[in-house]
């Protein structure tokens, strides 16, 4: 597979927001309730400040993005980070998410991060299965914490300890 990871930058704004907005408008996988302006991209850049963030390319096309972000800014949690990745729907289930996770795990280890967390909508069963398959375990559940498309959903927290 011809997959590469480019450091996320302003030039990726439109592609990243198109991918993210698909999930905001059509699924419970991204929490916002509607299309976000491209300027929202700066939030991703801010979340990942001093952390790895990549545009995922297949050939010359951007097919997704991934990033690490701090779990909590307090120094006691500096060895814990959250993972996020969104892959274009037509490219899911083809190994790109696993490649993104492997890349982020490698970067996390270099940074001294020992624990990765994932915050997942209970409606995103594919993501829950993906994380279980890739060594994460469930560590928390917030009942009815989210509300979107006229329906409540739970938020599932998953964790993975890095060696």
Image (spheres, rainbow, N blue to C red):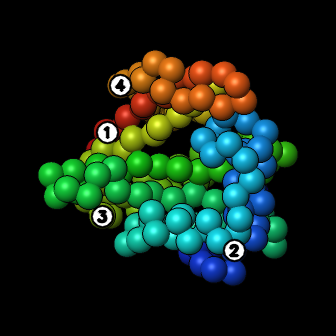
Q: Which residue is found at the position 42% from the left and 31% from the top?
A: 158
| Measured Cα–Cα span from mark 1 to mark 3 | 14 Å
Q: In which quadrant will I find the C terminus?
A: top left
Query: Residue 157, percent across and down?
Result: 42, 31
Q: Mark number for residue 161?
A: 1
Mark 3 or mark 2: whose residue is earlier in sequence: 2
| Measured Cα–Cα span from mark 3 to mark 2 | 24 Å
Q: Secondary structure at mark 1?
A: strand
Q: Which residue is found at the position 41% from the left and 22% from the top?
A: 141
Outermost residue toward the front in this view: 150
| Tag 2 residue | 12
Q: In which quadrant will I find the N terminus?
A: bottom right
Task: Count residues near mark 3 (Cα–Cα under 10 Å), then give few for <14, some for 14-19, many for 20+.
Answer: few
Q: Secondary structure at mark 3?
A: loop
In front: 95, or 6? 6
Q: Mark number for residue 60?
A: none
Left or right of residue 148: residue 119:
left
Q: Mark number for residue 111?
A: 3
Q: Secondary structure at mark 4?
A: strand
Q: Are marks 1 and 4 in contact (CB under 8 Å)?
A: no
């Amino acid at each position: 597979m011809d997959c590469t990871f480019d450091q996320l930058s302003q030039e990726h704004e439109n592609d990243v927001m198109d991918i993210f907005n698909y999930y905001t408008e059509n699924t419970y996988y991204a929490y916002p309730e509607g299309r976000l302006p491209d300027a929202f991209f700066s939030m991703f850049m801010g979340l990942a400040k001093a952390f790895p963030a990549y545009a995922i390319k297949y050939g010359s096309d951007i097919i997704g993005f991934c990033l690490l972000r701090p779990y909590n800014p307090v120094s006691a949690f500096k060895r814990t980070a959250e993972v996020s990745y969104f892959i274009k729907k037509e490219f899911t289930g083809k190994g790109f998410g696993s490649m993104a996770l492997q890349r982020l795990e490698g970067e996390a280890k270099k940074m001294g991060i020992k624990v990765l967390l994932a915050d997942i909508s209970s409606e995103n069963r594919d993501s829950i299965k993906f994380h279980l398959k890739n060594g994460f375990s469930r560590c928390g559940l917030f009942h009815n914490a989210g509300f979107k498309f006229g329906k409540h959903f739970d938020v599932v927290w998953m964790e993975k300890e890095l060696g």
